[in-house]
Image (cartoon, rainbow, N blue to C red):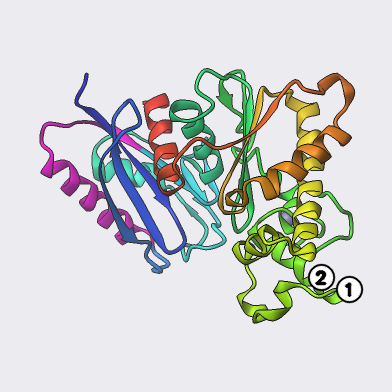
Amino acid sequence: MDNEVVAGIDIGGTNTSFALVNGKGEILAEGRTRTDDNPDPDPFIKKLAREIRSLLGKNSKFSFKGAGVGAPNGNYHEGTIELPPNLAWKGITPFADKLSEQLDKPVVLTNDANAAAVGEMMFGGARGMKEFIILTLGTGLGSGFVVNGRVVYGHTGFAGEYGHVIIKPGGRECGCGRQGCLETYVSATGIVRTAKIFMEKRKDDSLLRHINPADIDSRKIAEAAAEGDKLSIDAFDYTAEKLALAIVNAIVVTSPEAVFLFGGLTKAGKLLFDPLQKHVDRLIQPVFRDTFKILPSALPEANAAVLGAAGLAWKEL
Ligand SMILES: [Zn+2]
């Protein structure tokens, strides 16, 4: 039916965004609410359901199918949010069941990076692809692996935590309690760590030395690199090499048609993609050479997370 809609919901540490999305991936109405810092998630779930019902109420022509949710530490199998690192909710929240009760419609839930994978598959650059990987390079590194048209969730529901594959034993300390995880090198925060290490170890001048160290972020490094700043260019090259290593390792496992990159760090464009392709070409196992593309995500950055969550609902409900 033409007037059918789902709600896509992206739960973030500070804000939760939601939208009514049709089967073509068009956003018909949207809203945003603060993610409560209340340790009890129930009032938040009630508030969210109320706001979604109010969006629907203003548009009574819609036929509402249900909702898809992308959440940190979302467990697809159980519909739960488990020990989320940046939310106040403790323990395991049966979020999908509780929201479904409030909305009186089915609700599906997954983690945010897997939602991005579904969004890319339904509405983005992976339309028509059955084998691809998406890596989201934000504060951390998230990933979604799609094999034979399905997101790989694994036995626990948590498969695809590629940000925590160890690429350097004994390397940088990670928030997960271990050392040398990919995301400590390849993420918006990882490249800042790299640049600061370079600034300490090296003597050459850099544009970065002329700004307050607390203000150095991935965007400032990209701006400096774009102006030809050697240290910043080297920081991108180092990041790209680590990312290339992670990509060629993943290629060996699933042999995808494409690897999509999404998130803040990819805004650097050629500064990241050019050295990345160079290192991938150098490191790739010959049998996989030129068998896959590395592409920026085709989803609009501002709406990608709610579109991914909506895509999940469209795919599964
Ligand atoms: Zn880790």
Circle 2 SS class: helix
Task: Name the spot of residue 313 as percent of width and height, x first.
Answer: 38, 31
- Name the residue located 52 percent from the left edge and 17 percent from the top edge: 128
In the picture, residue 85 is in which quadrant? bottom right
**66 left or right, relative to 54:** right
On residue 158, the disc is none
Q: Nearer the viewer, residue 143 or 128?
A: 128
Task: Name the spot of residue 183 as percent of width and height, x first.
Answer: 71, 54
- Against 188, residue 160 (above or below) is above
Task: Name the spot of residue 288 as percent of width and height, x first.
Answer: 81, 22
Q: Which residues are magenta?
A: 41-67
Query: What residue is pinned by disc 1?
Result: 201
Query: What residue is pinned by disc 2?
Result: 197
- Name the residue located 11 percent from the left edge and 44 percent from the top edge: 58
Tell which residue pokes out farthest to the front in this image.
Answer: 227
Q: Circle 2: is it few (<14), some (14-19), or many (20+) Cα within 10 Å?
A: few
